[in-house]
Image (cartoon, grey):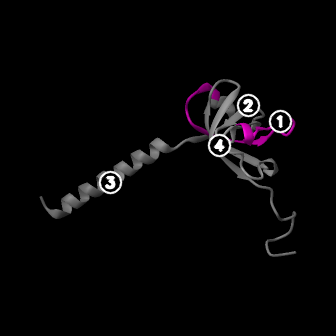
Amino acid sequence: MKIKYIIAIVLIATAIGAIVSTYGDSSTYVAFDTAVENIGSEYHVIGSLNRDKPLEYNPEKDANHFSFYMQDSLGMEMKVIYHNTKPQDFERSEKIVIVGKALNKDEFEASQILLKCPSKYTEGQKPGEL
């Protein structure tokens, strides 16, 4: 076989391997209702903290247990359980993205929490202006 064909086959095999591995790791953005319909599948859910319900975090008892109530973009609320420390400035976040899976119709287990912090700029102010 010519060296060109061998290189082409190796490149194609590498590309196919990369596509398959990326596809297997991807998850989609959904609301809680979809996550509940597919218990055990991993999803991204965007929502906001329900400030009327308590946060459960006691680092002296268990530093790796944090739970809170979150409302998704459609208004459905679930208890979110996160087996890690509470993120810094969690209460100040405007939006929350959680990555994880529904345990049942009332609880969602998050493996990651991503926060959108409040803007440090006032409306109409541009970066660099005082």
89 drawn magenta: no
To which residue does mark 1 refer?
A: 54
Q: Residues within 10 Å of mark 3 (few under 14, many from 20)?
A: few
Location of residue 7 by image quarter: bottom left
Observer-side mark, 3 or 2, equals 2
- Would you say the residues marked 1 and 3 are in contact, meaning their CB atoms lie under 8 Å apart? no
Residue at the disc numbered 4:
84
Q: Earlier in the sequence, mark 3 or mark 4?
A: 3
Q: Quadrant of the N terminus?
A: bottom left
Q: Of callouts 4 and 1, which one flags the residue occurring earlier in the amino acid sequence?
A: 1
Amino acid residing under circle 1: Pro
Alpha carbon of mark 1 to alpha carbon of mark 3: how far? Answer: 49 Å
Residue highlighted by disc 3: 14
Whether residue 113 sits left or right of residue 24 in the image: it is: right
What is the three-letter code of the residue carrying label 2? Met
SS category of the residue bearing label 1: loop
Tell me which residue sits at (80%, 56%) in the image. 118
Q: Nearer the viewer, mark 4 or mark 2?
A: 4
Task: Please give the range of residues in magenta.
Answer: 36-61
